[in-house]
Image (cartoon, rainbow, N blue to C red):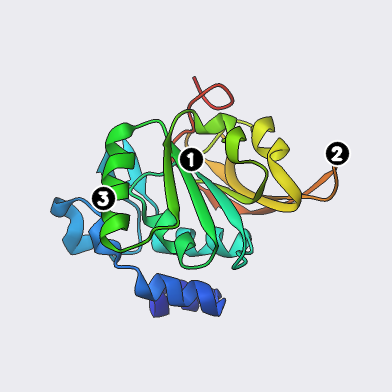
């Protein structure tokens, strides 16, 4: 998976490649799909949610520029796989999702793997997690029609936000950098297709 799907597409970040090699992806996939866990595509995990394609997980991880002392917010816990990758790279991960079934299952797997720096929260991720802000980086694993303002507001100066933005079935992967209190820079990293981000600052 790492060699053929990730390195072959140009991702060479050593720490990210190591994390992708070490975390057992099949443990985050429902039993009926485990035979396909390392395939080059997303897979359903229930509740109309998915575990992202391995390459996209790696790409989004590289784009937040993870540092060992970072505190990162993940919006959309899903299977817990993205949080597990982040846990190998940063100091703390706060992960929020609206589905208690998913956060419960994700927590069970990451605890089994002794990933004790992941903290799961239930709520509207489009509003961020103000209690623990500001964050060094925010990674959103669902697509909104616009960039949620609370997520921009909850970045530290120099903080990075990576998320898909656009229509329900086709988006652009964007990276935002908070330059100072009032200014941001952003980049476009290509077309993607994610499940919709629901909530106050997402889709209805």
Query: Residue visible at 40% across and 62% down?
Result: 54
Query: Residue visible at 56% across and 33% down?
Result: 144
Mark 1 falls on what kind of element? loop
Front residue (pair 142, 171):
142
The residue labelled by disc 2 is 182
**Looking at the image, is 186 positioned above or below residue 198?**
below
Nearer the observer, disc 2 or disc 1?
2
Mark 3 falls on what kind of element? helix
Give the CA separation, mark 3 to mark 1: 22 Å
Apparent side of residue 71 relative to residue 157 in the rendered image (left or right)? left
The residue labelled by disc 3 is 108
Q: Position of residue 169 (x, y in %)?
A: 47, 37
Mark 2 falls on what kind of element? loop
Q: Position of residue 26 (x, y in %)?
A: 24, 62
How many marks are shown on the rendered structure?
3
Labels 2 and 3 touching (C-beta < 8 A): no
The residue labelled by disc 1 is 142
- Number of residues whose C-alpha sits closer than 10 Å to that of mark 3, classed few (under 14), some (14–19) or many (20 or more): some
Q: Position of residue 121 (x, y in %)?
A: 43, 37
**Looking at the image, is 202 positioned above or below residue 191?**
above
**Looking at the image, is 136 positioned above or below residue 129?**
below
Front residue (pair 119, 103):
119
Task: Give whichever of discs 2 and 3 has the lower sequence position.
Answer: 3
Give the CA separation, mark 2 to mark 1: 25 Å
Give the CA separation, mark 2 to mark 3: 39 Å
Residue 2 can be seen, yes or no: yes
Labels 2 and 1 touching (C-beta < 8 A): no
- Number of residues whose C-alpha sits closer than 10 Å to that of mark 1, classed few (under 14), some (14–19) or many (20 or more): many
Task: Give whichever of discs 3 and 1 has the lower sequence position.
Answer: 3
């Amino acid at each position: 998976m790492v060699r053929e799907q990730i390195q072959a597409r140009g991702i060479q970040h050593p720490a990210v490649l190591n994390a992708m090699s070490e975390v057992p992806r099949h443990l985050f996939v429902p039993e009926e799909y485990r035979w396909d866990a390392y395939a080059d595509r997303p897979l359903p995990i229930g509740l109309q949610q998915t575990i992202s394609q391995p390459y996209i997980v790696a790409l989004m991880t590289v784009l937040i520029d993870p540092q060992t002392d970072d505190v990162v917010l993940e919006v959309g816990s899903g299977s817990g796989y993205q949080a597990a990758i982040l846990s190998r790279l940063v100091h703390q991960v706060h992960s929020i999702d609206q589905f208690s079934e998913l956060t419960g299952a994700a927590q069970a797997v990451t605890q089994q793997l002794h990933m004790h720096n992941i903290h799961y929260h239930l709520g509207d991720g489009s509003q961020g997690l103000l209690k623990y802000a500001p964050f060094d980086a925010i990674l959103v694993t669902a697509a909104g029609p616009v960039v949620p303002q609370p997520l921009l507001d909850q970045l530290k100066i120099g903080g990075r936000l990576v998320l898909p933005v656009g229509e329900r079935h086709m988006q652009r992967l964007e990276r935002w950098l908070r330059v100072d209190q009032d200014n941001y820079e952003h980049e476009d990293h290509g077309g993607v297709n994610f499940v919709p981000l629901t909530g106050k600052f997402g889709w209805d």
